[in-house]
């Protein structure tokens, strides 16, 4: 059994064949998935999908790239939705310094407010970090993320950063990039971190793992991520699968 902790089945890319994509995931023994919403449209769709399928859950938050568009009403709305029985986390949230649509200061403020909300509603958070590791770690520490914990989504950082995050009660989640031949760092980190802090994901439709790199990603392919990490850790595929599934269920408060 596999748990894909980060999917965007709410994306337009699945408009025509969502059911087939989900069926293929189930055939590959992907037991559970968390659909991540990050703005008005994708949050609404994430909830719709989670309501339709009992094995699919939702995480809701505001993306740092669009931080400039977040109004007080949006945060209030997210707080109301956080009480929904299928909402298991807040996010994705964080910092993205690759794109400059939203100024850094605005991104930081929106990030802090969402962590504060997560502590209020007692839900773990899902972190998006692009080119902003130092500020992300500082804010997580200052806002006491350890109270709720969460996920460093699609982690590609160093072992030092991974350890700092684990010390703050965070899990480290790997996606497609860990399967790329030239991904030396993610492979090293995946091999080294404790298995009880490890999660797997696809971030589909993006970041498609080898051997489908370049094609549209889908949750069934999380099996390639699991295969790669099991090999790196020198354990069986089944052990890796059951351990990461157990980790995810515990973090999201889903019955084991
Ligand atoms: Ni994502």
Image (cartoon, rainbow, N blue to C red):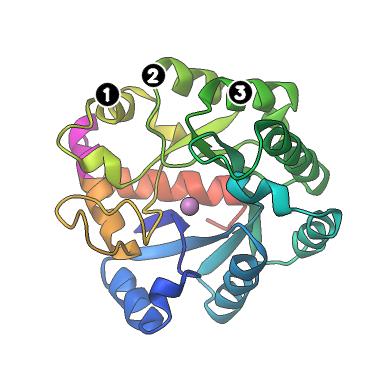
Residue 64 visible in the shown view: yes
Q: In which quarter of the image is residue 189?
A: top left
Residue in the picture at 62% in, 70% down: 41
Q: Name the residue under label 3.
A: 135
Q: Name the residue under label 2.
A: 159
Choose the circle earlier in sequence order: 1 or 3. 3
Secondary structure mostly seen in the magenta stretch: helix
Question: Is the C-beta separation of discs 1 and 3 under 8 Å?
Answer: no
Say which mark, if any, is on residue 117: none
Residue in the picture at 26% in, 55% down: 223
Choose the circle earlier in sequence order: 2 or 1. 2
Residue 249 location (% of width, % of height): 52, 52
Figure label count: 3
**In the image, which residues are magenta?**
228-237
Say which mark, if any, is on residue 188: 1
Q: Is residue 229 left or right of residue 4?
A: left
Taking depth in this image into account, of 139 and 174 the one nearest to the observer is 139
């Amino acid at each position: 059994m596999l748990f894909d902790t980060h999917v965007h089945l709410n994306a337009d890319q699945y408009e025509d064949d969502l059911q087939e994509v989900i069926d293929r995931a189930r055939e590959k023994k992907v037991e559970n998935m968390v659909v991540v919403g990050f703005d008005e449209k994708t949050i609404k769709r994430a909830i719709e999908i989670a309501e339709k399928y009992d094995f699919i859950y939702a995480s809701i938050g505001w993306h740092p790239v669009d931080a400039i568009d977040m109004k007080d009403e949006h945060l209030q709305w997210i707080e109301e939705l956080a009480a929904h029985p299928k909402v298991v986390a807040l996010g994705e949230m964080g910092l993205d310094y690759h794109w400059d649509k939203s100024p850094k200061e605005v991104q930081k403020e929106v990030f802090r407010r969402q962590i504060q909300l997560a502590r209020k509603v007692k839900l773990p958070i899902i972190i998006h970090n692009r080119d902003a590791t130092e500020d992300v770690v500082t804010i997580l520490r200052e806002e006491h993320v350890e109270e709720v914990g969460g996920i460093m989504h699609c982690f590609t950082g160093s072992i030092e950063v991974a350890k700092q995050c684990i010390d703050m009660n965070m899990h480290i989640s790997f996606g497609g990039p860990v399967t790329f031949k030239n991904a030396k760092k993610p492979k090293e980190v995946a091999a080294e971190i404790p298995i009880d802090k490890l999660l797997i994901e696809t971030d589909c439709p993006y970041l498609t793992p080898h051997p489908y790199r370049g094609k549209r990603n889908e949750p069934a392919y999380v099996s390639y991520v699991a295969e790669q990490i099991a090999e790196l850790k020198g354990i069986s595929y089944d052990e890796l699968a059951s351990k990461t599934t157990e980790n995810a269920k515990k973090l999201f408060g889903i019955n084991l």
